[in-house]
Amino acid sequence: MDRLSVNSQIHFGKPCIAGTRITVQSVLELLNEGLSFEEIIRDYYPDLQVEDIRACLQYAIALVAAEDVHLASANS
């Protein structure tokens, strides 16, 4: 997780790739759109490394693992 940082002065304290203003959320949204790591680096963030994108995924996994999520059904 040393590839990520939180600074209250950058993007209102949202987690970013260390040394950049690229938010974890932005990277996760691109992954959600179906882009590969290579496409994200080539087309959007050429300064990133594959390990930076993996750190974003690890961060999201850690958040979900730490939370007690309760999903409500659509019929409720």
Image (spheres, rainbow, N blue to C red):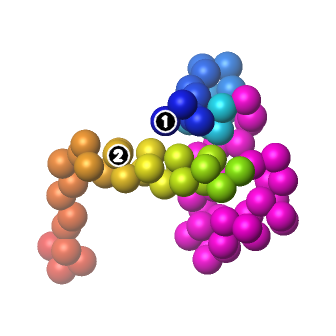
- Seen at 61% across and 77% down, the residue is 34
- Seen at 63% across and 47% down, the residue is 52
- Seen at 19% across and 67% down, the residue is 72
Find residue 10 and report its horizontal and vertical position in percent: 68, 26
Q: Mark 1: few, some, or many residues within 10 Å (few <14, many ≥20)? A: few
* Amino acid type assigned to the residue bearing label 2 in the image: Ala
In the depicted structure, whether residue 14 falls above or below residue 8:
below
Between disc 1 and disc 2, whose residue precedes? 1
Magenta-drawn segment: 19-48
Q: Mark 1 — residue? A: 1
Q: Residue 51 carries which label?
A: none
Q: In which quarter of the image is residue 35?
A: bottom right
Q: Mark 2 — residue? A: 62
* Amino acid type assigned to the residue bearing label 1 in the image: Met
Q: Distance between the residues labelled 1 and 2?
A: 10 Å
The answer to whether residue 14 is visible is: no
